[in-house]
Amino acid sequence: MENKISKIVSLAKRRGFIFPSSEIYGGFGSSYDFGPLGVEMKRNIKQLWWQEMINNHDSVVGLDAAILMNPKVWEASGHLSGFSDYLVECKNCKKRFKSEEAKNKCPECGGELLKPRKFNLMMKTFVGPVEDSASTAYLRAETCQGIYMNFENVLNSMRLKIPFGIAQIGKAFRNEVNPKNFIFRTREFEQMEMQWFCHPKQANKWFNFWKKERINWYLSLGIPKKDLRAVEISAKQRAHYAQKQVDIEYRFPFGWGEIEGIHYRGDWDLSNHSKYSGKDLKYFDQESKEKYFPHIIETSVGVERSLFAFLINAYEEVKGGRTKTTKAVKEAEVVLKIHKKLAPIKIAVLPLVKNKPKIVKKAKEIYQTLKPHFTCLYDQVGSIGRRYRRIDETGVLLAVTVDFQTLDDKTVTLRDRDTMKQERVKAEDLLKTLKEKLK
Ligand code: GAP
């Protein structure tokens, strides 16, 4: 199964999804760059999440807070004292691990381990020209602190009432001891977080509500039930701010792994920020005249981690090739059956041959017509079979092929990625047909 990961890593690079960062200098730790297809897929994930959380729910509004904040935020949030991992080092090979990943001996060489040491995960930087403690700042370790900083601003400017939510997408940074499994655990990543502010008595109800909503989101985007589970995390293993925590896990080839956390943070954040800042962040209910700290239910998902799960879920290898019409024994062929809403490229336009100017001209004309409506690619290099293989590997949903018959009757071939079925469609109806299919 681990083999599947190396195949996906290689495909991700070959087809323009994900590249190692600063590769010509030998890469940089766990940093990755998203190529032309990767960035489209990431945009789709973020747009679908935004649409789900904000458009499909009442009383959730958006925010885009700064990455750099007053360092007191991280003191009050408990991150400077409590956001740590225990690190162990192997005496023999000197490799470092999170202590929970290396119980008694080194997982790499079996060597003896040194005593665990506490290691804070916050990434430090300096603001301004002097590198001293007064200028120390931190790259945010979770996006939600920017939401708490703006709780009052949003409440007042939008004239909201409890319960309501604030959603945000943005970069987060953690000085992870042991980044691993490709883009599963990196030091720089993007989070999509929603903080739901509610009455303490309603918190349990809302926790269950959001847990269900979030699980349904993955199911609606093609992750099968059997590869998804919700795990309640014990008090000992919970994040320092959580009173209750359910992790939504995906069955990765290397085992079950968290893709999203649902956290009941109680009044941890607002009461601490009140205490540290001296600003009263309690909510006053005009009707009941009750004044209280709203309790927070958080949904928090990593963009890259969910993208990884969607990629793995989509990857299918067909031994001996997909087409059974020829007797020739072929190598394994790959098809990325990415959900249509997530697929980075929706349509490929292909002239059957590249040496017939009329066919090429028509194909280019169709490509230009479709481009403003869908993410499209145009490809005339190689045999048509090869090109179909190539677009199957990149998850392109539909191929429009312009052939000799097009010149006679103004129809084109439409090929479906998943079924490989082909149908003829009138060129003049193409846009309408594609819009219908991709709805
Ligand atoms: N605000 C709550 C919070 O940050 P978390 O469980 O630490 O909770 C939420 O992180 C999600 O962010 C995880 O489920 C995962 O998808 C993503 N994430 C966390 N650390 C990550 C890392 N080092 N690399 C990639 N994604 C990460």
Image (spheres, rainbow, N blue to C red):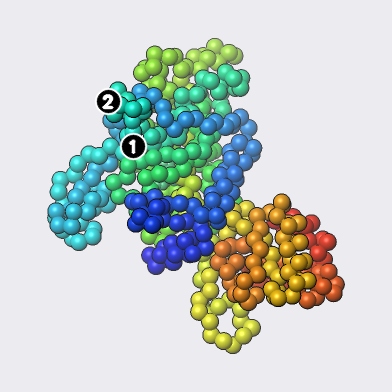
Q: Identify whether 19 is placed above or below 416.
A: above
Q: On the rendered image, what quadrant is the N terminus found in?
A: bottom left
**Side of 28 relative to 336 (left or right):** left
Q: Residue at x 58, y 62 (%)?
A: 395
**Residue 209 location (% of width, % of height):** 54, 38
Residue at horizontal 60%, vertical 45%?
A: 48
Q: In the figure, 258 relative to 321: above or below?
A: above
Give the side of residue 341 with respect to residue 188, left or right. right
Q: Residue furthest top?
A: 289
How many residues crowd around disc 1 within 10 Å: few (fewer than 14), some, or many (20 or more)?
some
Q: Which residue shows up at 55% across the image and 15% down it?
A: 285
Which is nearer the eye, 96 or 106? 96
In the rendered view, does 175 fall on the left or right side of 142?
Answer: left
Which SS class for mark 2? helix
Quadrant position of residue 174: top left
Q: Specify the amino acid type for callout 1.
A: Met
Q: Is residue 166 visible?
A: yes
Which residue is rendered at x = 47% and y = 49% of the image?
Answer: 304
Q: Residue 361's x, y, as percent?
A: 76, 67
Q: Is mark 2 within 8 Å of ligand 1?
A: no
- x then y, percent, for residue 322: 58, 76
Circle 2 Cα neighbour tier, 10 Å, few/some/many (<14 / 14–19 / ≥20): few
Q: Quadrant of residue 232?
A: top left
The residue to which callout 1 is attached is: 123
The residue furthest right is: 409
Image position of 427 with respect to 197: above or below? below
Q: Residue 242, how many percent across, how many down?
A: 38, 34
Q: Secondary structure at mark 1?
A: strand
Label 2, label 1: how far apart the Cα atoms are = 14 Å
Which residue lies under the disc numbered 2? 133
Instruction: Tell me if I can see residue 424 in this picture.
Output: no
